[in-house]
C-alpha cells in the first residue's frame, strides 16, 4: 500500500536515485510516451523495483533543479489500464504497476506515481523498438547517475542475474517451508514488506556507491561472493549517548 505522505515527500524534496526516476508528463496516447515510460519501468523492475514520478522535470534556469510542472492540455489524465498497457506494449514478461496520485504541496498540481514491482525470476526485456528511445530484445538496468541503460560489463550483468537468482531462491525456500511446516509462512503486512524492500534497495545502492571508486580487484568488492541479512529490532529503547561521545553505548536507566 502506497502512503500519501511518502508520495508528497517525493514531490517536496525531489531527489532522483536508482529506485526513483522523475519524468516530464508523457503522452500515453503516443508511442514515444509509451516507450519512454516502458524503458524506465523495465530498468526499475530489473533493479528490484522503484517509482516513476510523472510531471516533474529539470529546470535549466535553476541549475537542473527538479520542479513541478502543470500537465499540458494535450496529455490526458492517466488511468491504471493506460499505464499498464503502455508499459506492456514493450515489456516482456508483462509488469503490473500500481498507479497513484498526490498533490504537490506548493504548486497544487496533481502528479502521477507509477510503482514498479521488483522480485522477478527472469530479467525483464523489451520486445519492440521505438527509434531513439528503446530497442527490441534489450535489458535495461539502473546505473549511477542515475540513468537507465543496458548492462555492458560483467559486473552489471552479474548484478542483474544475481537478483533473479535470489528471487528464485526465496520461492524455493517458501516451498520447503510449506513442506516442513505443513502450512504457508505468515507474510508481514504489505506496508512493512514494502518498507523492508525499500530499506534493502537503498542499502544496496549505498554500498554500490561506496565501492564504485575502488579498484576492480579491491577486497571490499567481495569478489568471492557475499550474502545479505536483514532484521528489525522491535520495541528497543533508543541508546543514550554521553555529551563527550567516546564510542561506548550507555544503556538507559531502569
Image (cartoon, helix red, strand yellow):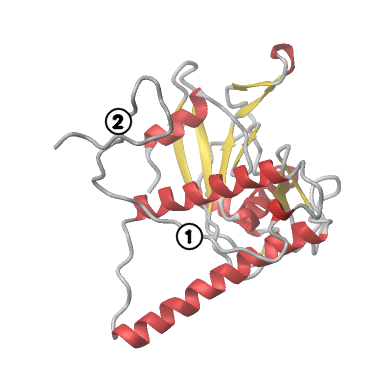
- Compared with 10, 170 (above or below) is below
Q: Which residue was labeled with disc 1?
A: 229
Number of dots carrying numbers? 2
Is 46 left or right of 187, judged from the image as shown? right
Crowd tier of the residue under label 2, counting other residues whose Cα lies within 10 Å: few below 14, some 14–19, many 20 or above: few
Residue 195: x, y in percent?
41, 48
Label 2: which secondary element: loop
Q: Which residue was labeled with disc 2?
A: 240
Query: Which residue shows up at 33% across the image and 24% down it?
Result: 242
Closer to the camera in the image, 235 or 27:
235
Report the quarter where the C terminus lies. Answer: top left
Residue 81: x, y in percent?
52, 53
Quarter-wise, where is residue 15 in the image?
top right
Is 57 left or right of 253, judged from the image as shown? right
Q: Is residue 98 visible?
A: no
Residue 146: x, y in percent?
70, 39
Report the disc number at residue 156: none
Amino acid at each position: 500500500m502506497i502512503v500519501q505522505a511518502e508520495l508528497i515527500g517525493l514531490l517536496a524534496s525531489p531527489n532522483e536515485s536508482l529506485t526513483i526516476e522523475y519524468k516530464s508528463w508523457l503522452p500515453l496516447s503516443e508511442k514515444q510516451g509509451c516507450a519512454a515510460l516502458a524503458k524506465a519501468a523495465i530498468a526499475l523492475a530489473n533493479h528490484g523495483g522503484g517509482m516513476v514520478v510523472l510531471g516533474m522535470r529539470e529546470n535549466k534556469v535553476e541549475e537542473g533543479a527538479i520542479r513541478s510542472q502543470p500537465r499540458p492540455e494535450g496529455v490526458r489524465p492517466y488511468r491504471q489500464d493506460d499505464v499498464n498497457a503502455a508499459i506492456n506494449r514493450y515489456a516482456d514478461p508483462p509488469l503490473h504497476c500500481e498507479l497513484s496520485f498526490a498533490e504537490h504541496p506548493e504548486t497544487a498540481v496533481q502528479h502521477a506515481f507509477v510503482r514498479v514491482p521488483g522480485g522477478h525470476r527472469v530479467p525483464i526485456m523489451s520486445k519492440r523498438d521505438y527509434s531513439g528511445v528503446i530497442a527490441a530484445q534489450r535489458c535495461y538496468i539502473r546505473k549511477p547517475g542515475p540513468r537507465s541503460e543496458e548492462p555492458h560489463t560483467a559486473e552489471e550483468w552479474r548484478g542483474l542475474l544475481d537478483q533473479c537468482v535470489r528471487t528464485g531462491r526465496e520461492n524455493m525456500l517458501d516451498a520447503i517451508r510449506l513442506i516442513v511446516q505443513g502450512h504457508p509462512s505468515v507474510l508481514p503486512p504489505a506496508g512493512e514488506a514494502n518498507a523492508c524492500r525499500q530499506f534493502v534497495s537503498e542499502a544496496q545502492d549505498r554500498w554500490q556507491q561506496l565501492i564504485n571508486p575502488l579498484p576492480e580487484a579491491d577486497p571490499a568488492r567481495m569478489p568471492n561472493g557475499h550474502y545479505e541479512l536483514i532484521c528489525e529490532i522491535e520495541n528497543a529503547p533508543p541508546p543514550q549517548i554521553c555529551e563527550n561521545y567516546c564510542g561506548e553505548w550507555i544503556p538507559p536507566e531502569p
